[in-house]
Amino acid sequence: MIYSGFFMPAWGVFALAVLALLLGNPVVAIVCIYLAAWTFALVTRNTALQYQLCIGSAISLAWMSVGHNQYGYAEHSVALFGITIFPVFAVPSALMGFYLIYETVHTMIPKSTPVIDWSLVIFLDLFLVVGMEYIGYHFFQIHNLATSQYSGFTWCNCFHAPWWMQLAYFSFPVIFFAAFRFLEKRFLRK
């Protein structure tokens, strides 16, 4: 039964994330999603998910070591040691979600090749990064005041950031996919 035993902590934290979103606090929601994913990965001993969360966390920490001064949110901004925590937890959570969507779509493809795999990654990358930025900006009112002077993508009125931050955001899923595929082939498939 999925609602009992070991799964209960993950579902409980996920329920807190949904509640936080409904109450309008995306920071608490994203931290809860991250913690729910780790709880689930550790309790179920899901090594693939643990790798994904480690890769996503490494990308996030590397990114924040470079871009930490580029973040300052109007509401719900929480900083730890001068680093805004929202992107620290949002990047690995989004990358985990990216991979779940990739795997779901990938199972629908009858014959997969590396070209098809990478084409799917790039398509999902473009679609999901812009989609998440749009939803975050327009529906959850996540506005980064530190980069608000940039025009962003005028066709969707989102992604208000310098070009190098935009490039980094689009590179995260590609780096994540490449790193996970390498680790998957090296350590998970024997």
Image: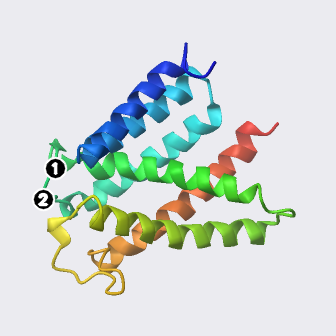
Please name the amino acid that badge 1 sits on: Ser
Q: How is the image coloured?
A: rainbow
Question: What's the residue at 15%, 67% (across, down)?
Answer: 146
Looking at the image, residue 32 lies above or below residue 55: above
**Dot 1 alpha-carbon crowd within 10 angstroms: few under 14, some 14 to 19, many 20 or more:** some
Left or right: 110 in relation to 16: right
* Residue 118 x/y as whole percent: 68, 68
Residue 77: which disc? 1
Residue that protrudes farthest toward the right in the picture:
111
Q: Quadrant of the C terminus?
A: top right
Residue that protrudes farthest toward the front in the picture:
22
Cβ atoms at labels 1 and 2 below 8 Å apart: yes
Q: How many marks?
A: 2
Quadrant hosting residue 109: bottom right
Please name the amino acid that badge 2 sits on: Ala
Frontmost residue, 24 versus 13: 24
- Distance Cα–Cα, label 1 vs label 2: 7 Å
* Residue 37 x/y as whole percent: 48, 35
* Residue 125 x/y as whole percent: 54, 68
Left or right: 21 in relation to 72: right
Looking at the image, residue 85 lies above or below residue 4: below
Quadrant hosting residue 113: bottom right
Residue identifier under label 2: 74
* Residue 65 x/y as whole percent: 29, 54
Frontmost residue, 58 versus 119: 119
Kind of element beneath mark 1: loop
Question: What's the residue at 54%, 24% (across, down)?
Answer: 42
